[in-house]
Amino acid sequence: MKVSFQLFNCAKTIAQLAKEKPTGQVVTVKGWVKHFRSYKNFTFMHISDGLSAALLQVVIPEPLNNSHVTVGSAVAVEGELNPSVGPEQHLELVATQNFPFSVRQRQSPDTLRQHEHLRPKTRSFAALLRIRILTANDCEAAGDVFTAEKVKVYTFNPAFRAESSLTRQHLAEFYMLEVEQAFCTSLEDLMKLVENLILNCIKTVMHESVEDLKICQQYHQTVAFDDLCRIEKLSSFPRITFVEATEILQNSNKNFSKNLKHLRKEDERFLVQHFGNLPLFVTEYPAETKPFYMKRNQDNTCALCFDLLVPHSGELCGGSLRECNLDILSHRMELLKIAEQSQWYSELRKFGYPDLGGFGLGFERLLQFFIGIRNIKDCIPFPRWLRHCST
């Protein structure tokens, strides 16, 4: 399946700027400080975005001696791109604004080997991650040779859940797409990314596998294909807050519980049907019901998160903005008594940690949504669930 991503609110990469050379334009560059020199009237820094070996020199028309910026800081810099007077590069960025997020100190290779979560910040290890494994052999006639570029961070791997659940919606082993996006400050931008991903998948499946979809619909006696035809024409999905969702449930004629802290499967199904059997984002769940690493609103009552509810599957995807403030995160971890064993996790916030957002999407639930299969155990070749693990 070929899926294309539309990126929202993204800065230009340094490699793109070097190729296009848009001199005189105001651009925004996001990345990490690799070199830093502050003088009486100017500050020079070299920034890497991690996507190539190229560095961009930034000229800041003021000293930053008393700032928190140092080697390893995550920064977003806005300024005018001009030809460089130095011989080492063709372009330099004259900054008008800069926004530091956090600080780290330079570490030796021996030290970094003991702190593997920091090694990707070094130039040499970042270069290692950019090197792709290539072969000229068409291994077992499996497909054409191709390369892949590290742009955003994602994994697509098996996930395991030790849940005591025998419902038609749960598996002990399933495939999960997990995405993390740096310099993500908006929950809306994150939802747009998910929205774009789902709509691209639907368009691709409807174009390339329409006959298979119809066969599956006939076999499982569902109207999933008709739902996809309607959803494919959408430009966006409805959005409601958790409070609005509970009001819809309580104002209905159904016997839904009051003072809900989370949505049950029957709640999710009702909400999807209430909005015309369309995908639906529910945002801002009560903070106490969500993991400690999620960013919260100003009064600390709601998590800045979302669940995407879809026909046939219920919750398909969940995402949030991540808490990047070390003091806030450490306090929550102390309350949960996990600070000591998860020290590496909090330590990441000390060393050039930008605003971050991410989401997880269950692949079998995506298939269930597309095909309309009632039981998720029929969406995977060898399903494993509670007290059932075929070898």
Image (spheres, rainbow, N blue to C red):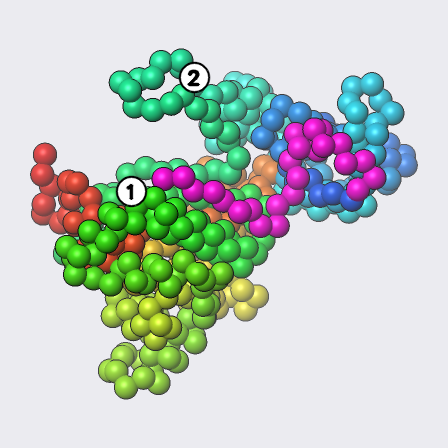
Q: Is residue 179 left or right of residue 60?
A: left
**Residue drawn where x is 43% and y is 76% of the image:** 244
Is any part of residue 229 visible from this angle?
yes
Indicate the amino acid at tag 2: Leu
Determine the residue positioned at 44% across, 61% down: 233
Residue nearer the viewer, 302 or 270:
270
Q: How far apart are marks 2 and 1 (CA)?
A: 26 Å
In the rendered image, which residue does mark 2 sit on? 134
**Residue 269: % across, % down:** 28, 69
Q: Is 221 a magenta residue?
A: no
Residue drawn at 27 percent across, 60 percent down: 224
8 drawn magenta: yes
Mark 2 vs 1: CB contact within 8 A:
no
Q: What stretch is highlighted in magenta?
A: 1-25
Counting from the top left corner in percent of width and height, residue 56 is at 72, 30
Q: Is residue 284 above or below residue 93?
A: below
Q: Which quarter of the rendering shows the C terminus? A: top left
Mark 2 element type:
loop
Residue 55 appears in which quarter of the rendering? top right
Mark nearer the viewer, 2 or 1: 2
According to the picture, the residue beneath numbered tag 1 turns out to be: 175
